[in-house]
Amino acid sequence: MCGIIGHIGEKNSVPILIEGLKKLEYRGYDSAGISIVENKKLLTIKSKGKIKELEEKLPKNLNSNFGIAHTRWATHGEPNEINAHPHIDCKNEIAIVHNGIIENYQSLKKLLENEGHKIISKTDSEILVHLIEKFYKGNLEEAVMNALKIVEGAFGLAVIHKNKKEIVVARKSSPLVIGIGNGEMFVASDPTAIINYTRKVIYLQDEEIATIDQDNYSIKDFSGNNVDKEIYQIKWDAEQIEKAGFKHFMLKEIFEQPKAIQNTLRGRIHEHKIIKSFNFDLSEIKKIIIVACGTSWHSALIGKYFLEKLTEIPVEVDYASEFRYRNPLVDDKTLVLAISQSGETADTLAAIKEAKEKNAKTYGVVNTVGSTIAREVDSGIYLHAGPEIGVASTKAFSCQVVALLLLALLIRQKKQKQIDENILEELKKIHEKINEIFSREKEIKKIAERYKDSKNFLYLGRGINFPVALEGALKLKEISYIHAEGYPAAEMKHGPIALIDKEMPVVFVAPRDSTYEKILSNMEEVKARGGKIIAILNEPDEKIKNLTEDIFIVPKSNEFLSVLLNTLPLQLLAYHIADLKNLDVDKPRNLAKSVTVE
């Protein structure tokens, strides 16, 4: 979602802030702005569109040693310069940048306007700067604290005053991190923005407020009590978020999957045993509920298959956004498992909090170390996939699938059940089979060239490959803007078959497994109606060859790991179609990398 960056020190903050904004572009945005203090005057410059348009508006030789900046993804108010952040008070003394949603902004707006405040934007965020102005009596932290006492909603907030060389930040349900430099300090919504300057970071938790100057920081809870915080050391390098010769981050991250999966596995299998412990007694777990959103929800569906087959524990999969609104039947014998690449997904975090209130055990499958979900859950597993910049998730999905398989095997092991050594052997060499697929990328590109102008796609799979079909369809619509739907193949006759004509490409995920004969029948039905079939197979097949226009064969694997191999050509198909259409693959329209508001 929106991105925040702040800097204070002796250096010129302007290039640091602009560079930070560029590092946050992957989160998705429609406008950008910067506020700095120069010669005790507050200067705010904003622009609709890309950061380069903001850069073009900046005066030459602009110099300041503290300021804040923001990339906005519109929620309240259309994308334009007025609605862009930072927002300033009536006296042009205070500037704020804000991620989140202020739910009671309409009533607060009426209150402030009655008191004479002139509110010029259509955003909920501007209310905050006027509230801070209302309470400001010389102590900026105190004014922010008093303003937030009457605010309902979510916020990651950074505030500056032209007469105070400090930045006040506060958080509730929207991520913020403080970066500790040498004679300089940073604040950001994502450590990606500051990794070039420091690896030492502090993650703020909900209802914490901090004041930073160039040498120090102080952190309090919303009751005014001082809080001691752990300092984390970021372990990934700045080079990991560069394109390294690839045209797009998404393509780079697709090709990083063999290494990312090895990182997820590293140190977790030893002598045919899974090494990982829980912070609670698994023997009492009678039900598992997995909560996730988007691509993570698709990995959750695959995880359900793993867990039920290997552990014989019943598993439900819920959209995190729906979980807490249906009064879920959860108790202390339920394990609620949250999947989130960022560890900051608002709906998933809310689902975890709901589960904990009902005394459920909680577990996280998270990529970002130190993230909110990672801190909230009782236990969990880090993916170690490295930073994922492309908005459309690829390597995180594959690592989630691997982590869920490890979890299922671990629970099976703890239940004193035999683990199939073939699964472990396949895990150890899966990176080789993935690289074999990537060596044939040109085959996928040729298929993409044939179908790049299609208006609709249908993706079909059965059993464990149904979620693969869903994920393939999601990737295509996310980055190419082609309408695509994923279905269980058997459901085609219950509606989608009406859409099939000679213009409709239909992608079948069709390995030779227990569902083979059924899916072959589904292909016959599509062929009879003129549909164009693209098949993902795991061995040559004459019957299917006679029905299809295009075939891509992945290496054979067991049923648990076949889903990884079947997903890869679908990722590449979506990527190449979008690239051939000259679209912005890494930053698709209307999308954000991490959805940190409901």
Image: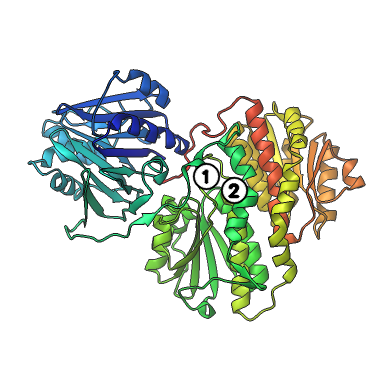
Q: Position of residue 268 (x, y in %)?
A: 58, 66
Label total for image: 2
On the rendered structure, is 203 left or right of 26? Answer: left
Q: Is residue 133 above or below residue 364?
A: above
**Circles 2, 1 touching at the beta carbon (< 8 Å):** yes
Q: Residue furthest left?
A: 137
Say which residue label 2 marks.
Answer: 395
Secondary structure, mark 1, is: loop
Q: Is residue 188 above or below residue 274?
A: above
Instruction: Name the foreground residue: 550 vs 50.
Output: 50
Secondary structure, mark 2, is: helix
Instruction: Name the foreground residue: 343 vs 459.
Output: 343
Give whichever of discs 2 and 1 has the lower sequence position: 1
Residue 481 visible here: no
Instruction: Name the foreground residue: 235 vs 140.
Output: 235
**At 28% from the left edge and 32% from the top edge, which residue is drawn?**
13
On the rendered structure, is 210 left or right of 553? Answer: left
Question: At label 2, which amino acid type do we have?
Answer: Lys
**At 82% from the left edge and 44% from the top edge, which residue is drawn?**
523
Question: At label 1, which amino acid type do we have?
Answer: Glu
Residue 354 sits in which quadrant? bottom left
Counting other residues with Cα less than 10 Å from the Cα at mark 2, is it few (<14), some (14-19), or many (20 or more)?
many
**At 63% from the left edge and 46% from the top edge, which residue is drawn?**
471
Say which residue label 1 marks.
Answer: 388
Q: Position of residue 510 (x, y in %)?
A: 79, 50
Q: Residue furthest front?
A: 182
Counting other residues with Cα less than 10 Å from the Cα at mark 1, is it few (<14), some (14-19), or many (20 or more)?
many
